[in-house]
Amino acid sequence: MFKFLEEKFVPIAAKIGTQRHLIAVRDGFVTLMPLTILGSFAVLINNLPIKAYQNLMDKIWPHDVWTQWGGNMWNATFGFMSILIAFTVAYHLARGYNKDGLSAGVISVATYLTFGEGGLSGMTTGTAGIFISLIIALLSAELFSRLSGSPKLMIKMPDTVPPAVAKSFAALLPAIITIGAFALVRTIISTSFNMPDIITAFYNTIQQPFMGLTNTWVAGLILAFVPVFLWTFGIHGANIIDPFLQTINLPAIAENAAALEAGHAAPYIINKPFLDAFVNMGGSGTTIALIIAIFIVGRRNKQYTTVGGIATGPGLFNINEPLMFGLPIILNPVLFIPFIITPMVSVTIAYWATKLSFVPAATIATPWVTPPVINGFLTTQSWTGAVLSIVIILVATLIYIPFVAMSSRVEVEEHKAESK
């Protein structure tokens, strides 16, 4: 099976992982990670459910003043996310073609705004427009990159002209064609289908139902399975699935936060904070539990204890490459089994614990390097999130223990055989 998958599947997955459009989407969202985290903490500032904290803030400032502070940060981050996505994704895609990324980003924003009803609005700028923003960023950057490579469309300026001005004129005709073409498409759609507000219509008919489909236990299992399955063959599965995950992540966080602020239950369980807090503890495969299992039953194997010791520090910050390549887990016929099973068990426990209201839904996007347990507390704004993290780590450790013992014993026996 390993040989078949290595020969047939791995090359395809490797090509997907290096596909420039997926890389552009991933890098575009990663560029905005600081703003995502800031917007999430703005929600935390306004809605931390601790009465003493709320009373203290009310004494320092009037309630409507300090909540406005958090609201202003939200408006500058999640409230402007679609515009930012239009820029960053187009920028990285153009750079992937070795073209002018800055011009591509600016043109993408202008192109996206041709689809907005009445210019800037909540639906156009916020997370509701992310899907259309993403599609337009990819298409407009693709078109601009191809047009800007044509010498017939390049306006050359004298050498005495400043480089910034020369670059602007070089992008002039490709920009006119790109924006004009998308503006025409928007005009045709809005007049032919009586759809003046395309972004709102797209959100209501496609984006929101699609997000609902991904908010199921089965979807959680798939999102937990794909990264670890690819990692088993040495392919960074998280990087491949991240572009898809990010497109549902930001709208889900935004709607959870809005529901929380309105005093309602968060509508979306599965998002990136959920996976980071309860599934990817220690890294893909819930490998913080693997480190614990090594120190419990793998002490006979010097390689395991050495790698486990080295991996402990990075593992506390959800970095598990020392384990992936040091034990290794990649192409390991024993450890790949719990490496795949454990995150699926983890997502199952976390999903139903949230679904049954034992813990609040994840609403805060913390940095992915936030240590386990602490992350569970921060993302859910509840001590029950921390307890859930501990429970999952204990269950995951029990899953890893027999396989670590078996793999360690095999490694020791093989080493003795080679020494004879």
Image (cartoon, grey):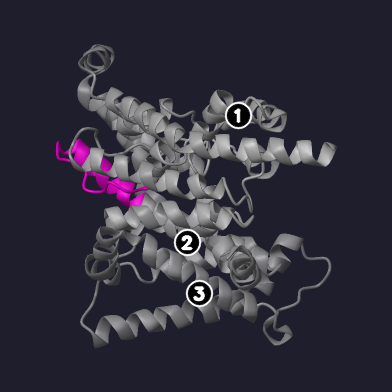
Residue at 64 percent of width and 55 percent of height: 234
Quarter of the view holding residue 295: top right
Q: Position of residue 217 (x, y in %)?
A: 28, 53
> Which residue lies under the disc numbered 2?
86
Residue at 64 percent of width and 31 percent of height: 311
Most foreground residue, 221 or 290: 290
Q: Quadrant of the N terminus?
A: bottom right
Residue at 70 percent of width and 83 percent of height: 150
> Which residue lies under the disc numbered 3?
139
Badge 1 or badge 2: first in the primary sequence: 2
Badge 3 or badge 1: first in the primary sequence: 3
Query: Mark 3: which amino acid?
Result: Leu
**How many circles with numbers are drawn on the protein?**
3
> Which residue lies under the disc numbered 1?
298
At mark 1, the secondary structure is loop
Query: Mark 2: which amino acid?
Result: Ala
Looking at the rendered image, the disc whose residue lies closer to the viewer, 3 or 1, is 1
Magenta part of the protein: which range? 250-271
Disc 3 residue crowd, few under 14, some 14–19, many 20+, Cα 10 Å: some
